Each structure stands twice: as C-alpha cells, then as structure tokens.
Amino acid sequence: MTKAETAKPEPKTVIIRPSKGWTALNLRDLWVYRELVYFMTWRDLKVRYKQTALGVSWAVIQPFMNMVVFSIFFGGLAQIPTDNGIPYPIFSFVALLPWTLFANALNNASRSLVGNQNMITKIYFPKLVLPLSSVLSGLVDFLIAFVVLIGIVLYYNLTGQAHITVTAALWTIFPFLLMAIMTALGIALWLSALYVQYRDVGYILPFLSDILKFISPVVYSTTMIPAKWQMIYALNPMAGVIDGFRWAILGTPTGPDMRLIISAIIALVILVSGVIYFRRMERTFADTI
Amino acid sequence: MKPVIQVENLGKRYRIGLAPQKYRTLSENISQAISKPFRRAGAIIRRSAGQDVLQPGEEYIWALQEVNFEVQNGQVLGIIGRNGAGKSTLLKVLSRITEPTTGSVTIRGRVGSLLEVGTGFHPELTGRENIFLNGAILGMRNVEIERKFDEIVAFSEVEQFIDTPVKRYSSGMYLRLAFAVAAHLEPEILVVDEVLAVGDADFQKKCLGKMGDVAQQGRTVLFVSHNMSAVLRLTQESIVMEKGRLVMRASSPEAVDYYLSAGNAKAGERIWETGEVPVDAAPFRPVALRLLDKAGKVVDTVRSTEPFAIEMEYDLASTLTGLRIGIYLSTARGEYVLTSFDTDDEKHFEKHGSRPAGHYVSSCVLPADFLNGGRYTLGVNASSYRVRRYFMDEQALTFNVDTSGAPGMQWTEPRPGVLRPRLEWKIESK
C-alpha cells in the first residue's frame, strides 16, 4: 500500500437529488477536474493539424491570407484609411490576431458539447471542461501568429515603409487577450448549451461570426465611426479588444477610455450570464443531446 | 457502518416525442412550419425559466420509479432486467451523468463508472496518448496513470503498437486497450455496464478475472449485464428491474431464475397494429409473432436447454394459393442461422396448397440444446413462391438465449459459434 492510500481521508459523501432552480455554480468541481482541462486542450492541439499537409502552418496561413485579401480589397480598392498612416497589411493583421482567436474559439467551443456527445452521455465530469479547453487550445495558434506579426513589423520597419516602435503599452495586450477569451467563452457557453437541444445553432454560427466581424473594427478603424455612435459601438467587446491591440502594438489613438470600460463590462456580463445559463442547462445535457 | 450507496424513492422521467401524424395536408404542413418557431421559442423561454413544458405530441415516460435499495461497503451487486427496464438509467443516475426527477441517492466514496469503454479515445492519437487522455476522462490523476502505465500496457497486450495511432488498430486491439485503462481505475465504488462483452474469448476471460479481483479487494461494485453466467459468477446478490421498478432483490441464483422465467408479455412478442401493415400486403394481414417457452408463455429470453416455439398469427381476407409463412433466424450481428417455411413438409404443402380466408396460426418448435447463448433476431415473411411476396419484416423481434445449464458451462469462457448442441462424446482409452 502506498502512503497516499493509507492517508486517504474519509470518503466524500455525495448526495444526488434533483436540483431545483438556479443551482450553485460549483466551480470547485472544475478545479478538481483541472487535469482534464489540460488533457482536452492537449488533445485538441495534437489532433488539430493531424493528417494535414501543411500542419501547424495553418495557424499562420489563416490570418495571413485574410490579411492579403483585406489589403487588396479594403486597403487597395476601397481605400479604407488607417490610423496614423500605418500600412494597411499591418493594420489589419494586428486586428486579425485577436479576431481569429475569438472566431475560432467561438466556433470550436460552441460545437464542443455536440462534438463530444459520447463523453456527455457516458461519463460524469463538469461539462464546462469542453468549451473551456476548446478556447484554450486556440491560444497556441495565437502565439504562432504573433511571431509572424513580429516578422511583418520588422519587415516594414527595415524597408522603411513604417516606423513602429515598441512601447511600454505592449503589456496591455494580455488583459485585452483575456477580454477576447472571456467574450468568446461567454457567447460559446450560451450557444453550446443551446446547441445541445437545437441544432439550429450550427447554422447560426457561421453568419453570426460574419456579422460580428463586420461590426468589429477588423477591416476598418474605429475612428471612422461617428462620435455619437462610439458608445453604442463599444457595446461590442471585440471593438474594445481590437482597438486595444492596435493601440498597444501600433500606437493608434484608440487607447483605453470610457468605451473600453463599456466593452469590459459587457464582456463580463456575457461571461457570467453564460456560465450561469450553462450550469443551469448542464443537468439536462445527457438527456437531450 | 453506513451503506455506501443509499437509493431512496428514486425516479427519472423522460420526455419523449411521439411520431408525427402521417397524413397531413400541405396547407397544414405550411401553417405548422410557420407557427412552429414561435411555439418553440415560447417553450425554450419557459423551459429555461425552469418550467417543464410538454409540446403537443410529447409524452412523459418514467424510466425509473420508486426505486429503493442500499449497498453495503464491499458488496458486489448485480442488476438484471430486460432492455428498457431502467438498468442503464439507474447507472447513469448513480454515476451523476443524468439527474433524477425525484428521490435521492447518497454515495459515500469515489465512483468510477464504466458505461462504455474507450470513451473519448481519439483515433488520431497513439495508444500511449489515449491512455493518458482516457485516464483523465475517467477521473484518474496524471501521476496515477503514470504509475500504472506499464501495467495497463501489459494488460492490453498491445505493447508493440503503443506508439501507433489507434485508428490503425484492429477493433480487438482497440477494445483491449480501452478496457485495460478502465480496469485500472481504482475508485471505492465501481459501476459497470456490460463492458465485458468486448474482445475475443480469451480477453473476455481476462476481463472477468479482473472484475473478480476488484470484487475481492473489498470494493463495492454494481454490475449490469445480460450475461447471466457472468452475473452468477461475480455477484452474490442481485436486483431485478422491470419497467423502471425494482421488483426483486435476492441472492443471484434466485434473481437470475426469476428473470429468466418471469415473462414480460410485451417483450418476445411483435404485434402489428392496423396502421403498421403496408397496404400492399392485402389480402395477407400479420397479427402477431410470438416466442413461447415450453410452458406456452411469451418470453424474450429462452434457455438454450429447453425447446421453444415460434408462433405466427395472421388473417387472410381472401383465399390464397401457394402461401408459405417463413421465418428467418439470424444472430444480432446479422448472420443467418436458418430459414424455414410452414409448408416445408410435403404433407403440409399438399394439404395447405390453397388457404381460404380466415384466421390462422402457423407455429414451429425449435429443439433444446440447439442455439448458443446470445442475442438473435427473428424475421418473418409471407409469400407465394414465384408469384408474389405479401409481407416481410426482417427484424420482427429479437430475443436472448441464455446458456445456464448448457453443456460446458463449467468453463465460463464464451464459445464461438451459433449452435450449442449437446453432443454424444465418447472418451475411450485405447
């Protein structure tokens, strides 16, 4: 007998009974299953680019090709102006980094429950593990794409087409990143729980993602939005995230102000309401999926 | 000492949708399609608010009702019952996969549940990677998996392929690896559902052995199975479920006996309602197909050591010439065992060459010591040779054959093959 077994405390008593109304969030359960979060994230990463010819390059190709297309059509043909005369490719790529993270996280996490049906109907675990690990695995793609951003910035600086200097504000991309994750997870918690019962969500996702992309300043600058609409525009947390990224990396005049507070509050509301709704519906997942 | 599992007045209700009405006009369909999203949205909102709302055409079904029992520490309890009796639902409630509708369960200790092996296995990952992933899914700590890794690999007998993606595994290897991980779970309470039905005979034997070890280590085990020999071997006591209720708790031999003899009239019988019969079957109309034990009772499980009868009841609206009623017996996996017609015998063939309108029953008896244990499917067909096929149902009913008392049951290993005859062996020393 190992030491761990002899020192085992009195077994924990669990009482299973129908839960009534709004149940406690029971996030402690999630902590107990933290290793599963790690393993599911790891599985997503391991599996994502298996049997693809280009492998992990896809993490770069996706935002990079978007950038090329945007630069040709929005930057070139439509002549959409950037802030401070920053070259359009950099301008859009900096926005595409958090956007791609957000869009992939939203898509993967929303589909995570239905995609793991057999786990839900055969095993007990906090279901939050599934959307959470889907979101986390997107971070690795983000890191890879970030390295590419450094390359692009260096290229433009060296060829004299831009003069981007790293400022102390760079560290703020971490809180902005957190905000993007919170928003993606929040919406995904709502959608994944609804997806269990209504497969309609599968059809809503692609166009929801498209709509969000155009109401976020991905291809254009927030400064193009008329002043009187700025506060309403800020209701979209991704507007705050992308503005923040541009400000932190490129020094655009979209730094933190009242609008960021609005964005942050909305992000928090989406996440908290999402967690509550998810926990509330969780107990019926195995029966309705 | 307090019981480790205490089930009190447990009930689980499911909402089931009824089949849509068959004949609807186009205008009805369109108006339904338009109003549906609104009614749905209303129901979503009400359900989210905690109200349980039935949609038109939906019904409740109680998968579990008023179930009460206790399990003491170290006890190995069998749970037996027909398909749909509520066994799996009970295990799902006990393993916290689904919530009960009424009542409560008090559990003292960590529960490990094996309702399926290989849950969460990913085909693209290697055997090694899947061991860690699956272990984590089953609730094992990383250090725990590392400690038992070699043991798991040895048990699964796939050492050579441990770094190969499992999609390249044969189904046998896949199941062996999956069971190996599950078998090394060490919870205080183990809940097992039929996972022994995997792999080849040797591996099944090994699994049964492992289960026996678990029981001997003083852990509490709940064991659901259709394999009565396994229940008898592994458990001393069993509960019998019927239609969501616990109908009996007794020593396992007694419970198994009750289960095998107490016929549930619904199972073992296929009755065709008027709406179910295709219109083009006329003038033939099937009424019922039944499986009868030697006492003439409708059963869905027959003993391989006793003869049983197959009975087809039907109506003819007008005289039919050359009619023959056929049965197709196949294994649950779809291999044919035999085909037989009621006019195979020349006497019958001549006497019943033409059957006037009326009510008929064609029946036959399958001999004792004939079929091996397992699950079988019975199909039925009514035709006039080279003229017309009136009716056909290839899977009219399924039934189980239980091998308790069959030749060779002193060895628990499953026997390959469809037949289990009692052969006259001679052993001579020459």
Image (cartoon, rainbow, N blue to C red):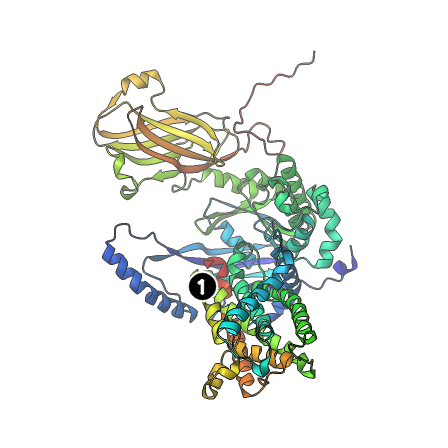
Q: Identify the secondary structure beneath mark 1.
A: helix
Residue B295 in the image: state x and y as whole percent: 41, 31
Task: Give the x, y percent position of residue B425.
Answer: 60, 18
Task: Chain letter for mark 1, please.
Answer: A
The quarter of the image holding the N terminus of chain B is bottom right
Q: Amino acid at mark 1?
A: Val
Residue A31: x and y in percent read: 64, 68
Please say if A99 is above or below A123.
below
* Whether residue A4 can be seen here: yes
Look at the picture and state if A272 lies above or below B417. below
Q: Nearer the viewer, residue B426 or A239?
A: A239
Relative horizontal placement of residue A228, taking residue B109 as reference (left or right): left
Depth check, front residue: A197 or B16: A197
Judge from the rendering whether residue B369 lies leftward or rightward of residue A8; answer left or right: left
Instruction: Report the number of numbered marks.
Output: 1
Tell me where residue A126 appears, x and y as whole percent.
Answer: 58, 64
- Residues B264 and B111: in front is B111
Please name the residue shown 62% across and 36% down the image.
Answer: B200
Image point (72%, 56%), residue name: B144
Question: Against B84, is A233 above or below?
Answer: below
> Residue B51 falls in which quadrant of the image?
bottom left
Which residue position is annotated with label 1?
A201
